[in-house]
Image (tube, helix red, strand yellow):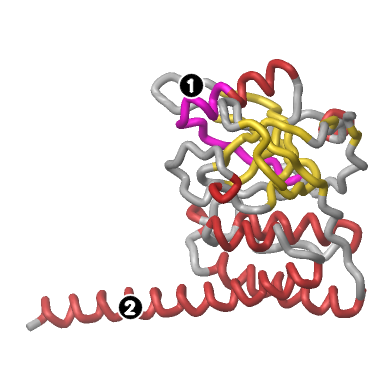
């Protein structure tokens, strides 16, 4: 029996041409769904992203989903180069998603523009033959439970995110936005945007997607940002020292 997902809080698109609000809210799916394996990405609700279709099987799944309008489960693989058909090959959580567009360009890999819907936990694999299918359970939306604590955490996350972005030249930040606004009704979407654009590992992003509540996600993301800032600072110091030593050796 198909179920209609609730409206998704829309946090803004990072893709120029995308379906309108009415279209992106229509996520109709069943508990048994085709798995769309992600090799370089983790999806977050309402944060559209481009996905490279370097694997022929992934391209076939995306094209069929685009042609039929059917939803698929976008979920990250633990080993990106694998042909996965076992539960342990995937991270625990993904997003039900729609393929909004597929672009074929000469001499380039096809790219699918993916619109993620609600979070879903992969419970089991029900078909191992291609296309692989799984049984899913929809996870509750991440919401704020304590407004004061959430705001304090969000402000800390936003500050740490800006520090990370500042380590990179403006033309190398990708979609990182150093000025993320604190808009209460879109706070969860803003955090999802920050996570999706921060240079974290697939494993780290998958852990954040699977957070049991919004506060836990904020706390975990903040700790990851703090570690990332330390690593980037060490990297910057090493770069400065390397340049200095090179200049000293040249002057001798």
In depth, the one of 137 and 59 nearer the eye is 137
Task: Answer yes or no: is residue 172 visible.
Answer: yes
Q: In the picture, residue 66 is in which quadrant?
A: top right
Classed neighbour count for the residue bearing mark 1: other residues with Cα under 10 Å, few (<14), some (14–19), many (≥20): few
In which quadrant is the C terminus drawn?
Answer: bottom left
Left or right: 166 as drawn, with respect to 44: left
Q: Which residue is depicted at the point 47% across and 49% down? A: 79
Q: Is residue 50 magenta?
A: yes
Q: Considering depth in this image, is 50 or 54 the residue closer to the camera?
A: 54
Which residues fall within the magenta stretch? 46-60
Alpha carbon separation for disc pair 2 and 1? 40 Å
- Residue with the most extreme left position: 252
The quarter of the image holding the N terminus is top right
Residue 5, x across and y down, in percent: 89, 39
Depth check, front residue: 247 or 103:
103
Residue 196 shows which numbered tag?
none
Q: Residue at x 54, y 29 (%)?
A: 58
Q: Quadrant of residue 15?
A: top right
Q: Position of residue 236 (x, y in %)?
A: 40, 75
**Residue positioned 60% across, 26% down in the render:** 131
**Rendered view: 211 above or below 63:** below
Q: Counting residues from the N terminus, which is met first, the one under dot 2 or under dot 1?
A: 1
Q: Residue 191: x, y in percent?
A: 74, 61
Which numbered tag is attached to residue 105? 1
Viewer-proximal residue, 207 or 226? 207
Q: Is residue 217 left or right of residue 41?
A: right
**Circle 2 sits on which residue?**
238
The residue lying at 78 percent from left, 29 percent from top is 19
For numbered disc 2, what is the local secondary structure?
helix
């Amino acid at each position: 029996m198909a179920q209609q997902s609730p409206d998704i809080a829309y946090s803004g698109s990072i893709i120029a041409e995308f379906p309108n609000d009415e279209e992106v809210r229509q996520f109709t799916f069943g508990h048994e769904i085709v798995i769309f394996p992600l090799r370089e990405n983790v999806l977050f609700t309402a944060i559209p992203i481009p996905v490279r279709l370097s694997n022929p099987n992934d391209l076939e799944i995306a094209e069929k989903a685009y042609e039929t309008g059917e939803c698929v489960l976008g979920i990250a693989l633990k080993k990106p180069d694998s042909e996965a058909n076992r539960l342990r090959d995937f991270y625990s959580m993904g997003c039900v998603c729609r393929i909004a567009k597929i672009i074929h360009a000469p001499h380039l890999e096809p790219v699918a523009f993916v619109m993620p819907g609600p979070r879903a936990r992969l419970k089991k694999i029900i078909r191992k033959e291609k296309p692989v299918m799984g049984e899913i359970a929809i996870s509750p939306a991440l919401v704020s439970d304590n407004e004061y604590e959430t705001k304090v955490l969000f402000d800390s996350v936003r500050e740490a995110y800006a520090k990370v972005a500042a380590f990179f030249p403006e033309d190398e930040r990708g979609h990182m936005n150093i000025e993320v606004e604190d808009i209460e009704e879109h706070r969860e979407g803003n955090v999802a945007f920050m996570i999706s654009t921060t240079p974290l590992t697939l494993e780290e992003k998958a852990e954040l997607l699977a957070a049991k509540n919004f506060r836990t996600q904020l706390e975990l993301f903040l700790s990851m940002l703090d570690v990332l800032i330390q690593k980037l600072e060490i990297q910057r110091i090493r770069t400065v020292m390397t340049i200095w030593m090179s200049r000293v050796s040249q002057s001798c």
